[in-house]
Each structure stands twice: as C-alpha cells, then as structure tokens.
Image: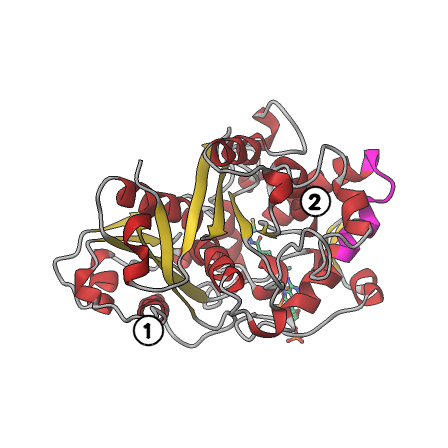
C-alpha cells in the first residue's frame, strides 16, 4: 500500500485569541503552505479535512469553504470530522487513508475557539463529549471524570501523586520554550501543590486550560514527498479505536482500551516497536492522562509510568521525552486543533527545527490523541526518512 508523508505544517499561537475560528483556521493553513521547502500551489491540493467540535455552538456551516478559500481552490472537497478532543487525530488518519487511496496532496486543519463562551455554556460544551445521562446531567465535568481515574490509579500506586506533580512541572517548563504555547511560564512543585483544587485530587496545574487556536499539516504520497522537501516526515503506522462512551460501562478502569487498541494497530505496520520511539506527544488533558497513556501506548510496561516519570525519563533530557511542546497542559487544548498540533510538533522536531525545545537526534516519534475520557483514540507513528 502507498505510504504517506508530512511535507508542511503550520500553527497559530495558542491562547486567548481575538479572532474567530475561520480566521484561525486560515492562518494555520497559510503557515502550512508557506512552510513547504520547495513551495506548493494550494490549488494542487485535492482533498481537505477539517477537525473541530464547534465549541459554543458556533456554526461553521459549509466548512469546506473555510479550507477551500484558504488554499485558493474553490472546487476542493472538504470533510468535517468531529470526535471530541480526538477530532484532529481522526482527521490526520483520514488524510493518510485518502493518500493511500490515490490523493496526491491533502490538507488537514484543526481549529477551536473556546474562550468566548461563559462558564455555564463552557461546561455544557465540554460535557457533550462525554456521557449525558450519568455524567454531564449529574454534574460530572471532565475534570471530575479524570479525578475519578486519578483516585483509582493513585490508590494502587503510592508514588503516583509525585509523578502527576512532575508531569505538571515538566510540561509547564517545556511550554515556557514554545512560542506557540498558551502558558509560557515554568511552575514549581510547590506552585502545583498550593494551587486551588478543581476536582480532588486534581488541582489547577493538573488541568489543561481553555484555549483558542488552530494547526494545519500537508500530507502527500511517500513516493512523491521529495518533490516538496528533502526532509519529509514519513508515516510508519496509524491506528484508531473507540470504546463505550460512559466510563462506568467500560470493561476496564482507569486505563483506556481505545488507546491500547489504536497503538496496537499503528505498530502493526511500523518497522519498529514502542520501545524504539524517541519522542512522544501524549494526550495529557489532565496530568493523570499522561501516566495512563505512557502505559496504554506501550512506551513503558504496565505499572511502569510512575517510576519512569519520577526517574525523569519523560523530560526533554530523558530517553523518552514526552510533550516537548508543553502538551495540552501548558500549550493548551483547543479541542479540534490538538491532534493536528501534535503532528505539527512531531514534524518540526523530527526535522530538527524545534528551536529551544529541540530534542537532539530524534528520528522516531508517536502522537496519541484521545476523545472525551477515552471513548475515542488515535495513535500515529512517524519516522524521519
Ligand atoms: N493551568 C494553569 N493556569 C490556568 C489554567 C490551567 N489549566 N486555567 C486557567 N489558568 C489561569 C489563568 O490564566 C488565570 O491566570 P491569571 O489570574 O494570572 O490571569 C487564572 O488561572 C484564572 O483563570 P480562569 O480562566 O478564571 O480559570 P477558571 O477557574 O475559569 O478555569 C479550569 C480553570 C481548570 C476549570 C479550566 O481551565 C478548565 O475547565 N480546564 C479543563 C478544560 C477541559 O476539561 N477540557 C477538556 C479535557 S477532556
């Protein structure tokens, strides 16, 4: 089967942005087009995917036009994908599949505008991505669901609180080096401990923020990638899976079977296994989620995430650096943009273009994107050719 490669990527600054979603998406697309080393005419793009939840209920309506206008190809077919916080990962997967089916050049953009919504509507729009009857309508927020997962995880692992604290400190330190991050300020362990509780045991620095932003990437056929650049980033495998929406109806708790299945599928076609990954973008919407993901995608063995994190292995200087861009925790989590933003980070890191946060010599990377509290998940694996 034809392989796929990334040949361009663009990112807006994440944070509180004055622009609407249309302008954010178009900024990311323009930056992605401008990033292609040998240049590209947007009119040669033959397929587009747009990932967005439509937070706050804003109507993009005829989403194709946003993407088509940005690339200057008004005939372009564009499909909108919504799988909650994993929308971006599913859009990346759709683009890879399109290339495998014969498309020449595909644009993927993820976008979300979240900060123009008040608290009550924000709770509604985050909550609709989880179970309604037993979770949202009984007052359980996503922070609440992840607090339940964290409580269960901590109960069996006495050092897990220290690992969650380290995830927060690490990802804020990484975000401080990323000019696109929402928060570019390091925090100390005592800042994490002293922060207000959001849903015990999770405090403010255990939670991702509410963020506006967009990211875009260009995917092409592996055999044609060098037409665009000398340093394409090749897709080695992709996997996706779903689980039951309501956490209490799942077969397992607190781990995510969807993440595990997505990783197994992705690694089936990769020429290397999870232990050969040199850099990972993991879906750390809450600090506990990074620990669960480390085990679910197989970067460490079962029950090894706490020890790996507390030993510093996931820091930028460690042997499996996780979320060098600050992760959802510090870079921000504009729902539909997140999965595409992860691939942006992989693209710049594997090309050695990540500036102050560069992981030296990384050649194999993984991106893991989760929707809701593990109801949907994607894993994509990449390598430098
Ligand atoms: N991490 C660090 N700092 C944060 C933050 C976060 N997650 N969220 C807000 N802040 C900061 C703000 O920048 C602000 O700082 P300032 O006073 O220096 O300007 C301060 O905390 C208060 O911000 P505010 O927007 O009033 O916070 P809030 O109480 O309304 O919201 C949360 C805080 C944690 C409840 C909110 O960020 C949240 O809901 N996060 C989770 C989002 C989510 O569930 N996403 C889906 C995941 S599956």
Quarter of the image where ligand 1 sits = bottom right
Task: Tell me if mark 1 has few (under 14), some (14-19) or many (20+) residues whose alpha carbon lies within 10 angstroms of its own.
Answer: some
Find the residue positioned furthest to the right.
Answer: 158
Q: Between residues 151 and 153, which one lies in front from this camera angle?
A: 153
Label 1 vs 2, first from the N-terminus: 1
Residue 311, placed above or below residue 353: above
What separation in Å lies between label 1 and label 2 (alpha carbons)? Answer: 36 Å
- Whether residue 82 is visible, yes or no, is no
Query: Mark 1 falls on what kind of element?
Result: helix
The magenta segment is 155-166
Question: What is the x, y in percent for residue 316?
Answer: 69, 61
**Quadrant (top left/top right/bottom left/bottom right) for the N terminus:** top left
Q: Between residues 383 and 120, which one lies in front from this camera angle?
A: 383
Residue 141, placed above or below residue 227: above
Question: What is the x, y in percent for residue 330?
Answer: 62, 64
Any atom of ligand 1 within 8 Å of the CB at mark 1? Answer: no
Main secondary structure along the magenta-highlighted residues: helix
The residue located at (76%, 49%) in the rendering is 200
**Disc 1: which residue:** 34
Task: Tell me if mark 2 has few (under 14), some (14-19) or many (20+) residues whose alpha carbon lies within 10 angstroms of its own.
Answer: many
Name the mark nearer the viewer: 1 or 2.
Answer: 1
Question: What is the x, y in percent for residue 139?
Answer: 60, 44
The residue located at (45%, 68%) in the rendering is 116
- Whether residue 115 is visible, yes or no, is yes
- Please give the count of numbered marks on the rendered protein: 2
Question: What is the x, y in percent for residue 4?
Answer: 35, 47
The residue located at (68%, 51%) in the rendering is 320
**Disc 2: which residue:** 291
Query: Mark 2 falls on what kind of element?
Result: helix
């Amino acid at each position: 089967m034809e392989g796929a490669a990334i040949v361009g990527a663009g990112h807006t600054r994440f944070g509180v942005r004055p622009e609407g979603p249309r302008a954010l998406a178009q900024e990311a697309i323009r930056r992605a087009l401008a990033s292609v080393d040998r240049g590209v005419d947007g009119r040669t793009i033959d397929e587009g995917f747009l990932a967005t939840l439509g937070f706050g209920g804003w109507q993009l309506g005829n989403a194709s036009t946003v993407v088509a206008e940005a690339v200057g190809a008004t005939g372009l077919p564009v499909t909108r994908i919504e799988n909650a916080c994993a929308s971006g990962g599913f859009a990346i997967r759709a683009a890879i599949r399109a290339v495998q089916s014969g498309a020449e050049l595909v644009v993927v953009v993820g976008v979300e505008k979240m900060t123009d919504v008040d608290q009550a509507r924000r709770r509604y729009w985050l909550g609709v991505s989880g179970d309604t009857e037993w979770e949202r309508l009984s007052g359980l927020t996503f922070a609440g669901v992840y607090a339940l997962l964290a409580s269960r995880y901590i109960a069996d692992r006495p050092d897990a609180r220290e690992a969650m604290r380290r995830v927060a400190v690490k990802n804020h330190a990484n975000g401080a080096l990323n000019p696109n991050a929402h928060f570019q300020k390091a925090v100390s362990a005592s800042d994490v401990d002293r922060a207000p509780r959001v849903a015990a045991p999770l405090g403010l620095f255990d939670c991702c923020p509410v963020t506006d932003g967009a990211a875009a990437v260009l995917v092409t056929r592996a055999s044609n990638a060098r037409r665009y650049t000398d340093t394409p980033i090749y897709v080695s495998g992709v996997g996706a899976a779903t689980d039951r929406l309501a956490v209490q109806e799942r077969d397992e708790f607190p781990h995510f079977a969807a993440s595990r299945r997505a990783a197994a599928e992705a690694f089936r076609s990769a020429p290397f296994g999870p232990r050969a990954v040199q850099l990972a973008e993991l879906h750390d919407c809450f600090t506990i989620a990074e620990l669960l993901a480390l085990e679910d995608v197989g970067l460490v063995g079962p029950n090894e995430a706490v020890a790996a994190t507390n030993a510093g292995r996931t820091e930028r200087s460690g042997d499996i650096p996780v979320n060098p861009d600050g992760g959802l925790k510090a870079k921000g989590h504009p729902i539909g943009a997140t999965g595409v933003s992860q691939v942006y980070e992989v693209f710049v890191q594997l090309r050695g273009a990540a500036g102050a946060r560069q992981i030296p010599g990384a050649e194999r990377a993984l991106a893991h994107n989760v929707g809701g509290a593990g109801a949907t998940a994607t894993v994509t694996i990449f390598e430098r050719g």
